[in-house]
Image (cartoon, rainbow, N blue to C red):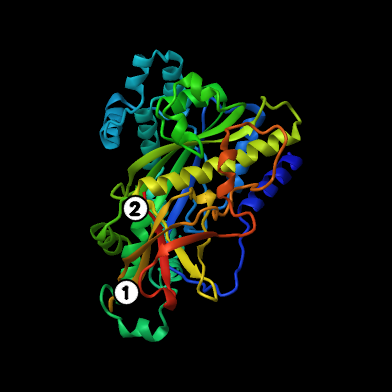
Amino acid sequence: MKKLTMLVALTCATATITFAQKGTKEMKYRRSSLYTIMVPSDKLTGEAKEVVTATFDTLAIPDKYNDHNLKVRHIDLTKIEVTPEEVKAAEEIRGGHKKGIAGLAKKGLNFAKKAVSKSETGGMGGDEKVAKILKFFKENYIANKLIGKWYNESKTLKGGSHFNTNLITERGLFGASQEELNKYKGVIGGKNKIMDAAEKDLVPRTFVMVTSYAYQSSEEVAAMAAAGSAVAGGTVGAITQLTASAAAAVLKGYFITTTSYLFQLDWDEEKMLTFYEKYWNAKDTKAFDTDTTFQLKYVGKTSDFAPATLKLTLKGDEMGMKLISRATARATDASIAKLQKKYEVFKTLSVLNVSDDGSTMYAYVGKKEGVKKGDKFEVLEQEADEDGNITFKKIGTVKVAKGMIWDNRAGAGEKLEGEAETKEDDDDDDIAYDKPYTTFEGKPGKGMEMGGLWLRQLK
């Protein structure tokens, strides 16, 4: 176990290395907040389960999000019972997304249908899984706990309340001077306008990502890809157009696969006022802790995979453990990246930097964030009104420069013996091996010379 912990720590440390560049200006902005939860499937057992779990527990929340993790980080969905009505409700929430299955029968890929229906969800359908997750949230008052974390809930009464706004101040008022704070006092309950704007902006952008992990063969992964399971990766665009047998030809070995479900805190001005009116000055927090007014809502899902080992790992296979750990980190990052591309509300911003001589535009994003050749990004300018409301105005568009993508994935540049194969090496010519950032080209719009611009990836 000690050796496993060291291997996992090394993998995760590699994934979080950052670089400081001359002329880079540190810019802060209001980030979304993220809480991640792991769900093991029936395709994750033994030593592989130990490695994946240890890696997940060590992975840091991406720096473009605030870490809003709670104590509970694992869910066993097999212990949660749901009714047919609850599953039906989840199906309606999900919009009845049933892609991939209908076309399989026409192609005669019966084994592919079996792989999609069970390997993705650990023997339960997607709607059932969403229903169980939502039930877990409701029965454990996860939304209340997330709100409680925002407002530093305490069992001890301090200053007339069990709550405070210190965390919101820390995450949302980084650019406001004391003079500015004093200028806009007295809007809601003694709060100033800037605080009110930060609160309304930050708290609703609280997300929970629940990820199911599996350790699967290339045949199972190929079946999922051929079924159109929305799997991302360097070669998946081609794989999803192939039959399962053809897809298997470009995959070899065993892979860590993920299916990630994204949820968002259901929070608006009405719920915020309810919170303040009912609980801010309450004598204790018991009623708040169990108030079912506060819930999470389903946003959507995505799936991904990362190559692990050429063969099933044996007990004590140190290299195999390292490969599985690296694959877990990469598949997790890829799921987050794909959710960002798929759902506008979950997208993040990156600072657009410019070199001292003005010849190079670059940003600290790369393959870890799902950047690929030809990707386009909006160039945004941040604006704030007198009430502290922040908006972003599009002023231009840039695209990734050829051969200038930063490979910042876990274990980047490290060739490990016994790694599963995906034929992704075809994309190596797009990697900038000598630069710890991705370079862009195009017309960023007026104001580039002034700095203070942001990038947001287009679909």
Visible in this render: residue 123? no
Task: Sort mark 1 into few (<14), some (14-19) or many (20+) by Cα contacts within 10 Å.
Answer: few
Under circle 2, the secondary element is helix
Horizontal placement of 6 versus 159: left or right?
Answer: right
Residue visible at 35% across and 41% down in the picture: 300
Say which mark, if any, is on residue 345. 2
Residue visible at 35% across and 15% down in the picture: 105
Q: Position of residue 181 (x, y in %)?
A: 36, 81
Assign the N terminus to one quadrant of the image: top right
Residue visible at 39% across and 42% down in the picture: 137
The amino acid type found where label 2 is placed reads: Val
Compute the Cα span from label 1 to label 2. 20 Å
Say which mark, if any, is on residue 70. none
Looking at this rendering, what residue extends furthest in the left direction?
A: 270
Q: Nearer the viewer, residue 458 or 343?
A: 458
Q: Nearer the viewer, residue 314 or 327?
A: 327
Look at the picture and state if 24 lies above or below 232: below
Visible in this render: residue 97? yes
Look at the picture and state if 172 lies above or below 45: below
To which quarter of the image does residue 106 belong? top left
Q: Position of residue 257 (x, y in %)?
A: 52, 33
Q: Position of residue 431 (x, y in %)?
A: 58, 51
Horizontal placement of 322 versus 305: left or right?
Answer: right
Report the residue marked by disc 1: 384
